[in-house]
Image: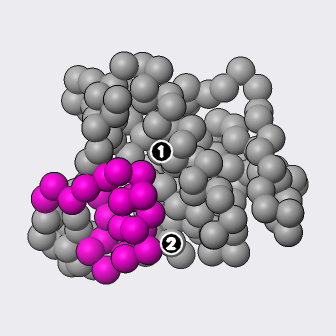
Amino acid sequence: MRCIADTAPGATVFPLPSDRPPVTLRGFRPTDVPFISAIVADALHEHYDPSLYQSLGTEWPDGFLVAADPSDVPVGFLLGVSQVDREARILMFAVARGHRTAGIGTLLMTAFLDRCRARGYGRVTLEVRVSNATAIRFYTRFLYSVIDLLRAYYSDGENGYQMARELA
């Protein structure tokens, strides 16, 4: 696997709606592991060995897009890789519960898709739980479509959808 999300030359601050503090998009840091693990457990209902994040962060340091609050605490992230020629795959993507509906997911997805286009990728895929209607609606707004049903895909036996979108 090869990571396709490059870290920007410097952190970029993005304003959110007036009732929310701005977030900074930056690359993954080892100190992010406890925060990202907590976001994954709550949002994705999965529990991975913390060394996985460190391994991915070390192996593909530009693979993590992290949205951090003004205290530099991660409040969302997106991890993408490239396993197939000219195709990106989103392995993990989540925003902390108290920060949802503030535009952070949109910011992360938009930045990721821009990076995919800049690298000449023609397609992006991801997996989502069939029960996660909110995420499916979000992905549909970004022109993803369901292309396959993945039976018992998740660790608790829940089915997943594989979704994909073409890039122009």
Residue found 86% across the figure and 63% down from its top: 18
Residue 52 image point, x, y percent: 45, 49
Q: Is residue 164 above or below residue 136?
A: above
- Camera-nearest residue between 76 and 34: 76
- Camera-nearest residue between 114 and 46: 114
Q: Is residue 83 above or below residue 160?
A: above
Left/right placement of residue 86 relative to residue 5 reads left
Residue found 36% across the figure and 60% down from its top: 140
Q: Quadrant of residue 17?
A: bottom right
Point out the image quarter for the C terminus. top left
User: Residue 79 shows which numbered tag?
Assistant: 1
Left/right placement of residue 158 relative to residue 47 reads left
Magenta residues (range)? 126-148
Residue found 70% across the figure and 55% down from its top: 74
- Camera-nearest residue between 51 and 163: 163
The residue under label 2 is which amino acid type?
Ala
Q: Quadrant of residue 102?
A: bottom right
Q: Is residue 56 above or below residue 43?
A: above
Q: Secondary structure at mark 2?
A: helix
Is residue 93 something that shows in the picture?
yes
The residue under label 1 is which amino acid type?
Leu
Q: Which residue is mark 2?
A: 43
Q: Residues within 10 Å of mark 2 (few under 14, many from 20)?
A: some
Point out the image quarter for the N terminus. top left
Q: Quadrant of residue 129?
A: bottom left
Q: Residues within 10 Å of mark 1 (few under 14, many from 20)?
A: many
Counting residues from the start of the chain, the first of labels 2 and 1 encountered is 2
Q: Is residue 81 above or below residue 19?
A: above
Residue 120 image point, x, y percent: 36, 19
Left/right placement of residue 74 relative to residue 149 reads right
